[in-house]
């Protein structure tokens, strides 16, 4: 067959292949609205905010240094957070990973009720009432999760609820790797 | 009575306004209004990705607008404000993405397609210009065809 008849067919199948690939990735949990974060490889933004449970105490970005932590941005009005929450609770029960919560633009009673009702997986819950710190973290769609290493460098970001697959395939291996690098067991 | 009802409604509206925790920032200098409009039109609302923060009613867009106003009030330049946003959200926050390696295809793609289109048109015209018979019947082929036909004739 001549090339000029073949070409449209080749283009057609190439397009089908691309669409199929993207659909497959969406099926595997890829978020097409995901935007790569420029913060990866950079130090966590500086902040000092009150704690959700102890309003008179503060938590600063310095306190994230020294161990690998999973920083999770959530809110009680956020539907996907509700979906994600049981997994975080399970993580806190079955692993020794330090999960730090940033409660985003929430009313304190609502947030406290959430933690009472659904379990509190957070080692510390930071209270970001006006969402200002979250903007520094580049947050645009809760829930968002960051992996921060011992030096306080952001190494990974996930937008949207963490799935079990994501946790097993990407998050846990990276945390293990970072812990080994930093001499943590 | 009617007036009383109007007052009641106004009161409720005012109260509902108070229920919003975050107070919108006001520009200190009205002369900065054009700058604010310009900036809020070049920054993308990250939640509703096809709207600028000027168009969007999303909560996050409102926060962005407030930050922009605050920074204008603090005397920051447009570049400083845009850089602040890009540092946190990447080039994607810009409605008009800058030209770099990652966006080269986006910027050059349409021109590339136009060039490919012209090449195709050029080739079609060239082929038509050659006349209809040239493709299949040069003298050598003609001779072969004749020989084959003669051959057929002999066999039958």
Image: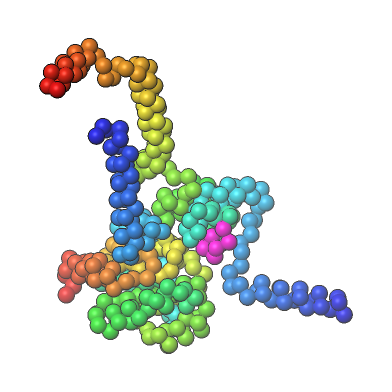
Measured as percent of width and height from the top left, residue B136 is found at 26, 20
Q: How is the image coloured?
A: rainbow
Most distant residue in the bottom direction: A116
Q: State the quadrant of the C terminus of chain B.
A: top left
Segment tinted magenta in the rendering: B56-61
Q: State the quadrant of the N terminus of chain B.
A: bottom right
Measured as percent of width and height from the top left, residue A29 is found at 33, 65
Most distant residue in the front direction: B156
Most distant residue in the left direction: B155
User: Left or right: where does residue A158 sit relative to residue B44?
Assistant: left
Q: Could you say which is closer to the camera, residue B68 or residue A120? A: A120
| Residue occupying image coordinates x 43% and y 51% | B92
Q: Residue A78: in sight, yes or no?
A: yes
- Image vertical order of residue B59 relative to residue B138, above or below: below
Most distant residue in the top direction: B139
Q: Quadrant of residue B14?
A: bottom right
Measured as percent of width and height from the top left, residue A158 is found at 34, 65
| Residue occupying image coordinates x 19% and y 67% | A177
Q: Is residue A124 magenta?
A: no
Q: Residue A43: in sight, yes or no?
A: no
- Image vertical order of residue A69 relative to residue B55, above or below: below
| Residue occupying image coordinates x 76% and y 75% | B9
Q: Quadrant of residue A179?
A: bottom left
- Marks counted in the figure total 0
- Image vertical order of residue B155 relative to residue A103, above or below: above
User: Left or right: where does residue B77 sit relative to residue A98?
Assistant: right
| Residue occupying image coordinates x 29% and y 51% | A17
Measured as percent of width and height from the top left, residue A26 is found at 34, 61
User: Left or right: where does residue B82 sit relative to residue B119?
Assistant: right
């Amino acid at each position: 067959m001549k090339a000029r008849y073949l070409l449209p067919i080749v283009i057609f199948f190439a397009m089908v292949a691309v669409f199929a690939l993207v659909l497959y990735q969406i099926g595997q949990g890829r978020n097409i609205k995901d935007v790569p974060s420029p913060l990866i490889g950079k130090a966590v933004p500086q902040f000092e905010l009150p704690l959700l449970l102890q309003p008179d105490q503060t938590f600063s970005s310095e306190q994230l240094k020294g161990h690998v932590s999973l920083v999770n941005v959530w809110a009680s009005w956020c539907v996907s957070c509700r979906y994600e929450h049981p997994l975080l609770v399970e993580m806190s029960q079955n692993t020794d990973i330090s999960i730090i919560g940033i409660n985003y633009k929430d009313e304190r009673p609502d947030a406290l009720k959430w933690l009472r009702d659904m379990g509190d997986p957070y080692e510390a819950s930071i209270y970001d009432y006006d969402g200002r710190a979250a903007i520094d973290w580049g947050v645009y769609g809760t829930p968002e999760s960051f992996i921060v290493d011992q030096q306080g460098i952001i190494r990974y970001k996930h937008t949207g609820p963490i799935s079990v697959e994501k946790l097993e395939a990407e998050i846990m291996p990276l945390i293990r790797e970072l812990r080994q690098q930093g001499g943590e067991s | 009575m009617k007036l009383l009802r109007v007052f009641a409604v106004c009161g409720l509206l005012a109260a509902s306004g108070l229920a919003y925790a975050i107070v919108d920032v006001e520009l200190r200098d009205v002369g900065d209004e054009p700058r604010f409009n310009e900036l809020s039109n070049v920054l993308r609302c990250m939640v509703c990705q096809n709207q600028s923060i000027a168009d969007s009613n999303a909560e996050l867009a409102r926060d962005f607008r407030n930050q922009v106003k605050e920074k204008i009030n603090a005397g920051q330049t447009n570049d400083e404000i845009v850089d602040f946003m890009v540092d946190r959200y990447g080039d994607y926050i810009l409605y008009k993405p800058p030209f770099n390696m990652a966006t080269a295809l986006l910027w050059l793609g349409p021109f590339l397609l136009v060039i490919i289109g012209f090449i195709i048109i050029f080739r079609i015209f060239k082929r038509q210009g050659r006349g209809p018979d040239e493709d299949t019947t040069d003298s050598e082929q003609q001779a072969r065809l004749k020989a084959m036909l003669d051959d057929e004739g002999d066999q039958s």
